[in-house]
Amino acid sequence: MLVDRFLRDSVQRAPDRIALIEGTRTTSYADLDRMTNRFANLCIAQGVQRGDRVVVASENSHELVAAYFGTMRAGAVAVPLPSGHRNDRFGKAINDSQPALCIVDAATAADATCREVLSGVPAVFVKASGRAAEAAPFGRSLADALTTLSDEPPQRRLIDLDLAAIVYTSGSTGEPRGVMLTHRNIVANTRSIVEYLRLSGDDRAMCVLPFFYVYGLSVLHTHIAVGGSIIIDNRFAYPSVILNAIREQGATGFAGVPSTFALLMNRPDFDGTDLRSLRYITQAGGSMPAARIREWRERVPDVPFYVMYGATEATARLTYLDPSSLEAKLGSIGRPIPNVQIEVVKEDGSRAAPGETGELVARGSNVSCGYWNDPEETRARFSAQGYRTGDLGYVDDQGFLFLVGRRHDMIKVGAHRVSPKEIEDVVSQHPAVREVAVLGMPHDILGEAPVAFVVVRRDMETTSEMFRAFCSTRLPSHKVPAHFVFRGELPKIAGIGKIDKRALSSERVL
């Protein structure tokens, strides 16, 4: 089955049902299908061939969704990217993917650096209107190009082993890589998520995650697959606006990364917000400390909360913790999703016993075939045994998985190997902490020492001495951070909201 079939089937079932909501603008499934056909025909008219890459760089919108599915309908490979404006990942991804066509927003087209990168692309179209379109000095108007094209579906044959998308990793701990996702990968993962979340055409997801991020894409895929509705809202810089929109739009689902929930809970109006329309909430995109999960559940007790774990290389999802097990297994990432197998593998390649730490290795139809233009890293991470996640963890005697940390993030404090996650979980228990990130920093004597970057809650006074005393009663001495750095905010990966540890690592604080 091809990804495009999700849209086709939903059109046949309920053509007038609302697919997308963006402010006061709504798009039915029938209208989205016609828009998708026009984008597919645009690709074909521009000479895009089967397997060519098509970049779409814009914030979430109706046009982005239609371009994404239209690229696949034309037999090409969709490459969703963040806007190139002030984004250092844009140029690297363009040079790596070598697209035959690009669709960009006005800010990207107006940026001199982006224009230089895009100058070698055969066709560039700018998504803008009014003054923004007039101000864009580069590319052709997307709206003008689409008006002359047919909304009848093109005829291009594909198989499910063909590439559907290349999704670039966030690059939070290293250079972004283009993960190759086939139609089979996306379809398999979509079906599994639909199954455990029990999604239907009645669901209406509030989507604040960008579609260039695989977590955001999974929200798009799953709701298009069941004929549900997606509320597109790009205003998460104003959390109170999102909280009001959830209520006003009657959202049944909400997805976020750990910082999403930290920001929402920090709003003074959070506890008074009516969230009764929500049927479920999902969290992925990094480990959320148990203390924050417990706080969320205390403040939003009536909405099931799904903890999830995955990777771009797994087309989004690998495990989930059912809300019914949340209290008993707090801190766990749950069990593998349907059609996924995960083993904990020790250094010598043998399978770890329950409680024994090793690397999580995943197998399933959702697992990528590798990295675009990077055969060496593909060989290192993908094999017949499965995808080596780089995450260290263990499984308990009931089959629940727990993460310990990232293999490459472990801090070598003298003769000890220390997990930043363990320290973060302890620091997060302090009632003054809103967010924390722990990194290993160079140390003259120990080689490395843990450093905690902390964001405290509003109107709460803290000192390094207070935190050091708090940690000293809960951690052995070599795990107590050597330094506490207080920040108003922690750097985030643009658009995604995950803490950017790579940016923090450039600071020298010892």
Image: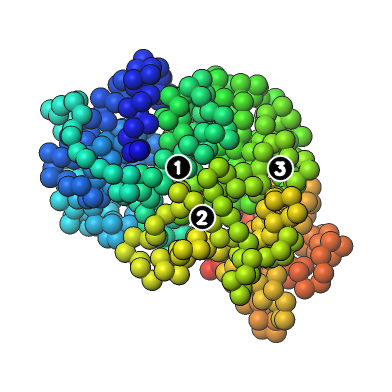
* The one of 275 and 86 positioned closer to us in this rendering: 275
In the current view of this chain or complex, which residue is farthest to the bottom?
Answer: 445
Q: CA distance from mark 2 to mark 3?
A: 28 Å
Identify the amino acid type marked 2.
Arg
Can see residue 5? yes
Q: Is residue 20 above or below residue 59?
A: above
Labels 2 and 1: the sequence-earlier one:
1
Q: Residue at x 32, y 35 (%)?
A: 4
User: Callout 2: helix, strand or loop?
Assistant: strand
Q: Residue at x 41, y 47 (%)?
A: 185
* The one of 5 and 475 positioned closer to us in this rendering: 5
Q: Residue at x 38, y 19 (%)?
A: 13
- Residue 140 falls left or right of residue 320: left
- Label of residue 293 in the image: 3
Labels 2 and 3: the sequence-earlier one:
3
Instruction: Mark 2 and mark 1 in contact? Answer it, CB < 8 Å.
Output: no
* The one of 419 and 30 positioned closer to us in this rendering: 30
10 Å crowding of disc 2: few (<14), some (14-19), many (20+):
many
In the picture, the quarter occupied by the C terminus is: bottom right
- Residue 298 falls left or right of residue 371: right
Residue 454, x across and y down, in percent: 68, 56
Identify the amino acid type marked 3.
Ile
User: Callout 1: helix, strand or loop?
Assistant: helix
Quickly name the residue at label 2: 363
Residue 298, x across and y down, in percent: 77, 34
Quickly name the residue at label 1: 188
Identify the amino acid type marked 1.
Ala
